[in-house]
Each structure stands twice: as C-alpha cells, then as structure tokens.
Image: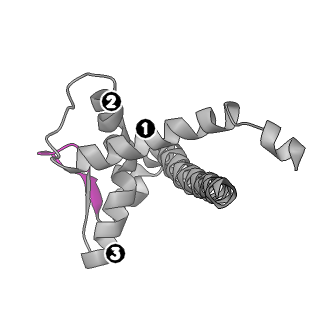
Amino acid sequence: MSQPNSRNRQLLLILLRMAASAMLKVFRGVSLLCLCVVGAAVVIAPLELLFYPLLKSIGCSLSDGQQGFACDGGWIGGFTSTVLNLPILFSDAREFTFGLRALSGRGVTIYLFDAIFILALAYPLLIIFARTGSRRGS
C-alpha cells in the first residue's frame, strides 16, 4: 500500500518542478521584455535632445504644466507622446523606487513604470544567479 502513495508523491514533486520551471521561464521572459522597454527609453532620451527641432515641427512640444511631451494628431500623436515620455516616466519611477519623492503627480502610472523598472533590474540578476547545474545533468 505504501508503494502507490510513494508514486503519487514522486509524481507531485515532478509536476511541481515542471510548474516552477514554467513560471521561471515566464518571469524571465517578462523581465527581458521590461529590460528592452527600459533600454528603448535610454536610447530615446538623447535622440529627443538631438531631434527636438524636428519634433517641434511635427507638432510635439514639451508641455509646461506637467513634465513631458504633448503631440498633436489623435491616436498617432498619443502614441508618439507616450514613446517620447518613456525616459521621463522611468526617471520618475527610478526616483520612486529608491525612496525619493517622484517629481510629477502621475498617479497610477508611476506604479506601472516602477514595476517595469524593477523587473528590468531583475533580469540581469536572473542571468547571474541562474542555476546551470540542472542543465548539465540532462
């Protein structure tokens, strides 16, 4: 009678390991995506400075009231302003993450960009501390 109970435990352990492995892969994928978004913000920041006259000519300008870009043109302008505001949003998220007060009152958006920033920081740690012993055994 103890033999089937032992098999059930082994099967449960195998299923738990498979679920943990799948969750780790999903977490790595989400962290890599967040790292790419933060990387894009780092690339966009100097380009904004270089191409500000061009941005101004197509209807995008720095808004006076709230720190950030505002663009004309419906949903395309909204998308463009969101992309142009990535560096500013991540700057606020970084300040929020490390305990300083965020400069602008962006509400819930700061929490989203804070989560993206933290997940982006987690990806290199996942790579550094990844266990390679289980892959060698296969």
Which residue is label 3 attached to? 76
Q: Is residue 127 visible?
A: yes
Image location of residue 133, percent across then percent down: 81, 37
Q: Amino acid at mark 2?
A: Thr
- In this view, 4 is above or below 77: above
Q: Earlier in the sequence, mark 2 or mark 3?
A: 3
Q: Residues within 10 Å of mark 1 (few under 14, many from 20)?
A: some
Q: In the shown orientation, is residue 109 left or right of residue 86?
A: left
- Examine the residues drawn in magenta and state their main secondary structure: loop
Q: Quadrant of the N terminus?
A: bottom right
| Count of marks, rendered view | 3
Q: Earlier in the sequence, mark 1 or mark 2?
A: 2
Is the C-beta separation of discs 1 and 2 under 8 Å?
yes
Residue at point 46% right, 52% down?
51
Res 97 label? 2
- Toward the front, the furthest residue is 1
Which residue is label 1 attached to? 118
Residue at point 11% right, 45% down?
65
Q: Earlier in the sequence, mark 3 or mark 1?
A: 3
Image location of residue 20, percent across then percent down: 58, 51
Residue 67 magenta-drawn? Answer: yes
Q: Residues within 10 Å of mark 3 (few under 14, many from 20)?
A: few
Q: In the shown orientation, is residue 111 left or right of residue 18?
A: left
Query: Which residue is nearer to you in this view: 105 or 99?
Result: 99
Is the C-beta separation of discs 3 and 1 under 8 Å?
no
Measured Cα–Cα span from mark 3 to mark 1: 29 Å
